[in-house]
Amino acid sequence: MLITAILFIVFGIFIKYGKMYFLIAGYNTMSKEEKEKYDIERIATVFRNVMFVMAFMIISGALIGDLTKNENLVNYSFCIAMATGIPYLLLKSNSKKYKK
């Protein structure tokens, strides 16, 4: 699970600061005209923030699980991070707020 959290942090950095927008599903298949309709910098910021929060939730669950000797807490934190982060990311990044 911690590897997943680290990957979220790395991908968040790559998308936002490395400008690797091809990691955003659907963006790389858009035509140049369609890409110009979106504020990709702001969308990348949303991706970075959500990925960081999801990683924080997973790491926090792992640390608290170790402290309390509750191995299930890691799984719960992972599931909660996925169940909240992915829908939020999809809804937020596809909103009209990020269209020019």
Image: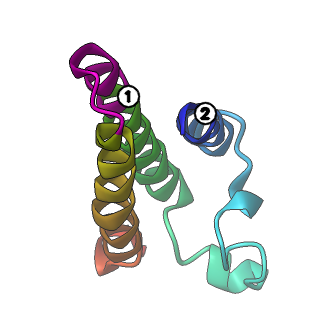
Give the residue number, with chain letter if any, for mark 1: 62
- Pinpoint residue 66: horizontal percent, then vertical percent: 34, 19
> Real-space Cα distance between discs 1 and 2?
22 Å
- Pinpoint residue 40: horizontal percent, then vertical percent: 55, 59
Q: Residue at x 30, y 50 (%)?
A: 76
Q: Observer-nearest residue: 43 or 10?
A: 10
For the residues bearing labels 1 and 2, Cβ distance under 8 angstroms? no
Q: Observer-nearest residue: 58 or 47?
A: 58
Element under disc 2: helix
Q: Residue at x 28, y 22 (%)?
A: 69
Magenta portion: prevailing SS class: helix
Quadrant where the image shows the N terminus: top right
* Colour mapping: rainbow
Along the polypeptide, which appears first: circle 1 or circle 2?
2
Give the residue number, with chain letter if any, for mark 2: 13
User: Please, is residue 57 above or below residue 68 in the view?
Assistant: below
The magenta segment is: 61-71
Q: Observer-nearest residue: 39 or 19?
A: 19
